[in-house]
Structure formats: structure tokens, C-alpha cells
Amino acid sequence: FIAPPVRPISIRVDKTVLYAGQDIVVTCVVPRHEDNRKVEALLPGFTASEKQLNGNDADAIWNNFTFKHVPSDVDQAVCQLTDKYGRHANAVQTLQVIAPQ
């Protein structure tokens, strides 16, 4: 059996340039598909949040995650989709977090 490819995922953020300490909203856009099991939004090195998906019965394709008080060393936001085979698809957005002077 050859598993079908992981479905694509895309990312949107409410801002790509922000000051350290501000909040950011990361939106992971996931098409409904029977193999989808989990979507995760990450600010690598800082924090992550996940939502379980129920395949075709997932309640939304737009999954919003709010991260508060983003530190200046964060330089990416990532959305990661995991399918029922444990495979991942990623979407990455570069961020510029400005440190206080």
C-alpha cells in the first residue's frame, strides 16, 4: 500500500513585523481531508499549540492560534499538518521581531 501524499497546508500571520512583547495570530489553512489528524502552529524556540483534526469532519479549515508576548529571538512562524500515517506537511513564514532599544 502506498499512502497518498500529505495534503498541502498554508500559513497566514496578522503581521510579519512586530515589536518584542506584542501578540501574533497565526492562521493555518488546512483543506478538509479524511487523512488529516493534527494541525500545529509553532514559533520555534518559543512555543507551540496544536489542534486535533477529525479528517473530513474537521470543523474548520481556518485554524487560528494566538501567541502572546512574542520575544525578539523568534524569526519564524510554522504551521505543521500531520496525517494519519504520521507524515508532516509544513508552511513557514519569516518574521521580524524588533527588540526594544
Image (spheres, helix red, strand yellow):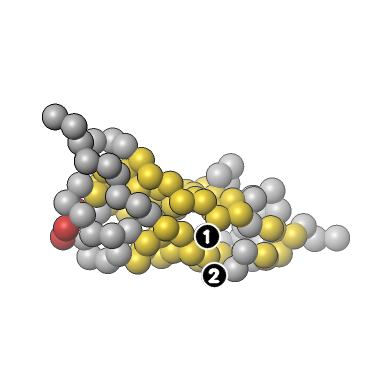
- Name the kind of residue labelled 1 in the image: Phe
State which quadrant residue 100 falls in: bottom right
Across and down, in percent, residue 20 comes to: 70, 60
- Residue 57 visible in image: yes
Residue assigned mark 2:
14
The residue located at (25%, 47%) in the rendering is 37
Q: Secondary structure at mark 1?
A: strand
Tell me if mark 2 has few (under 14), some (14-19) or many (20+) residues whose alpha carbon lies within 10 angstroms of its own: few
Q: Secondary structure at mark 2?
A: loop
- Residue 38 visible in image: no
The answer to whether residue 67 is left or right of residue 85 is: right
Considering every residue shown, the one lying at the far bottom of the view is 14
Q: Assign the C terminus to one quadrant of the image.
A: bottom right
Measured in 3D between alpha carbons, the distance from the residue under mark 1 to the one under mark 2, in whole angstroms, is 11 Å
The residue located at (30%, 50%) in the rendering is 7
- Name the kind of residue labelled 2 in the image: Asp
